[in-house]
Image: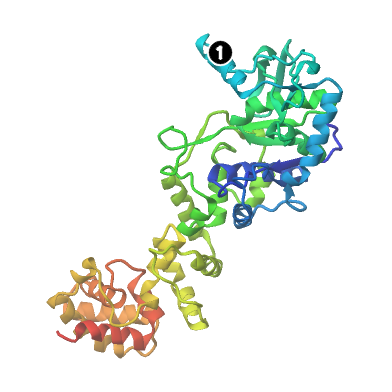
């Protein structure tokens, strides 16, 4: 690649489902490499499988990329829309003798596969029509167009991650580039699109390494420069097995619904296979500045939900309260059905209470869902339903303590955490009781739970009227 040539990468998902986590990492690596070099990342939707492709899947992919903060340059490119161009190139290869028509029937191909299996060989096409005169074919017989692969020597991929990878050409088969209905196949379409889009670097999963050898031969047959390639390791589960749904092979939208911050997911994904010293946490600017394939290992990365949660908790605690509240508001429309429901809109009064409580809430939450669950005491409607653990603090002694502390709190001149804490401590000292003996019944009465943000912060957030009313609800029978 010439020094002055702009680096162009591409992310090329198939719209047959959601944007899964492995695809999201591939997009991220493409994006980081392009941005690091001041280049461009293009988006190509590989929608040639019309039976399985859908507009809903396209939108899910675009939405997932936007949520992750991964933008692309120009409009998304539809591979299917350029099928005519792919056929044109296939005809060009046919005319130059780099491809040929194959008239083998399905039965003949089945026989080839059976013979290869019986002889312990891979089930490859045997080249029946490679050098046969097409005039020998029955008139009007259907045919496919096959690429005439090199049979001598070897095909070498100097990969940015995997290093020098050598494929003996004797192992390369004459792959189909046009089906019998005239539709182009994947390996041809990818080569033509990458060339026409000016892609300089192909960044994708290592499972495409064999395709890289096939595609390199097509590039060379057309007289085109072969792009640089970087085949990144796959993502496995924590047990080392291929990533499955139980490990986290879910759509990006599932991570949003679970309450992960896009910045945390982005940071976690970049660390799946790439490292830079001993650093764990990177801002987006640091990722762009430091990313390179020299930091990408060859071994499969292991996805670990516990580590992702720890990353997310770190990001939440490090977030400025107002910024985290904005993330929470953006998340609420995506709450799953089993989560506490959110109001249709967050008004200014609720927003102010959430902001006041945020410092305490974020210390006890690792996801936005947990953050919202922790904030339920703010939106709860009296009388509160206490959970089982909270009820253990609302026995006769707890209710008597609530009855005793209520007038103390009611007499506070300023309803502020500091003054309320001082008044409560003074009462505890005079009454000869531990502060916890007062705080736990208060927490249960005010939140319905045994765990909450600091209790005096809870009082301040709820306000004088609501706090005293909730205490009275539980102290009434004392």
Residue at image point 44% right, 51% down: 309
Can the viewer see residue 413?
yes
Asked whether, in this view, residue 323 is left or right of residue 73, the answer is left
Can you say whether 470 is above or below 218 in the image? below
Can you say whether 288 is above or below 131 in the image? below
Horizontal and vertical percent for residue 148?
76, 19
Asked whether, in this view, residue 477 is left or right of residue 253, the answer is left
User: Label 1 neighbourhood size at 10 Å, few (<14), some (14-19), many (20+)?
Assistant: some
Residue at image point 33% right, 88% down: 412
Element under disc 1: helix
* Colouring chosen for the image of the structure: rainbow
Residue 406 figure quarter: bottom left
Which quadrant would the C terminus be assigned to in this image? bottom left
Horizontal and vertical percent for residue 425?
27, 77
Horizontal and vertical percent for residue 323?
56, 67
Tell which of 288 and 115 is nearer to you. Answer: 115
Residue farthest front in this picture: 139
Residue at image point 57% right, 28% down: 298
Can the viewer see residue 7?
no
Residue 22 figure quarter: top right
Horizontal and vertical percent for residue 84?
80, 41
Can you say whether 398 is above or below 222 in the image? below
Residue receiving disc 1:
116
Residue farthest left in this picture: 396
Which quadrant would the N terminus be assigned to in this image? top right
Tell which of 165 and 184 is nearer to you. Answer: 184
């Amino acid at each position: 690649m010439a020094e002055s040539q702009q680096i162009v990468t591409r992310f090329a998902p198939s719209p047959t489902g959601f944007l899964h986590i492995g695809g999201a990492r591939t997009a991220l690596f493409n994006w980081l490499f392009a941005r690091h070099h001041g280049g461009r990342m293009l988006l190509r939707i590989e929608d040639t499988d019309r039976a399985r492709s859908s507009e809903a899947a396209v939108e899910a992919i675009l939405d997932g990329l936007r949520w992750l903060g991964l933008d692309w340059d120009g409009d998304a490119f539809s591979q299917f829309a350029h099928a005519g161009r792919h056929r044109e190139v296939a005809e060009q290869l046919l005319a130059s003798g780099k491809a040929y028509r194959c008239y083998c029937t399905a039965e003949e191909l089945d026989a080839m596969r059976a013979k290869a299996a019986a002889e312990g060989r891979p089930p490859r096409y045997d080249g029946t029509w490679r050098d046969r005169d097409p005039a020998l074919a029955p008139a009007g017989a259907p045919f496919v167009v096959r690429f005439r692969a090199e049979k001598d020597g070897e095909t070498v991929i100097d990969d940015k991650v995997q290093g020098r990878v050598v494929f003996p050409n004797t192992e390369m088969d004459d792959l189909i580039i046009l089906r019998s209905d005239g539709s182009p196949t994947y390996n041809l379409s990818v080569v033509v699109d990458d060339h026409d889009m000016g892609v300089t670097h192909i960044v994708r999963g290592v499972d495409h390494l064999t395709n890289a050898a096939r595609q390199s031969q097509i590039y060379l047959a057309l007289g085109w420069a072969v792009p640089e390639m970087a085949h990144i390791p796959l993502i496995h589960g924590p047990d080392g097995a291929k990533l499955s749904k139980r490990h986290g092979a879910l759509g990006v939208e599932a991570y949003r619904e679970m309450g992960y911050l896009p910045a945390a997911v982005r940071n976690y994904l970049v660390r799946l296979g790439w490292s830079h010293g001993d650093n764990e946490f990177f801002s987006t600017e640091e990722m762009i500045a430091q990313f390179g394939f020299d930091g990408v290992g060859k071994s499969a990365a292991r996805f670990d939900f516990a580590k992702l949660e720890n990353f997310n908790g770190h990001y939440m605690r490090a977030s400025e309260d107002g910024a985290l509240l904005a993330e929470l508001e953006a998340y609420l429309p995506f709450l799953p059905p089993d989560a506490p429901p959110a109001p249709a809109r967050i008004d200014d009064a609720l927003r102010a209470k959430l902001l006041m409580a945020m410092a305490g809430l974020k210390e006890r939450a690792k996801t936005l869902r947990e953050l919202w669950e922790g904030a339920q005491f703010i939106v709860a409607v009296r009388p509160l339903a206490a959970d089982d653990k909270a009820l253990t603090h609302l026995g006769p002694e707890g209710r008597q303590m609530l009855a005793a502390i209520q007038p103390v709190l009611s007499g506070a001149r300023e309803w502020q955490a500091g003054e309320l804490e001082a008044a409560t401590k003074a009462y505890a000292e005079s009454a000869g009781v531990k502060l916890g003996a007062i705080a736990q019944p208060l927490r249960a009465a005010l939140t319905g739970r045994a765990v909450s943000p600091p209790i005096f912060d809870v009082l301040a957030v709820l306000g004088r009227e609501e706090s005293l009313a909730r205490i009275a609800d539980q102290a009434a029978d004392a």
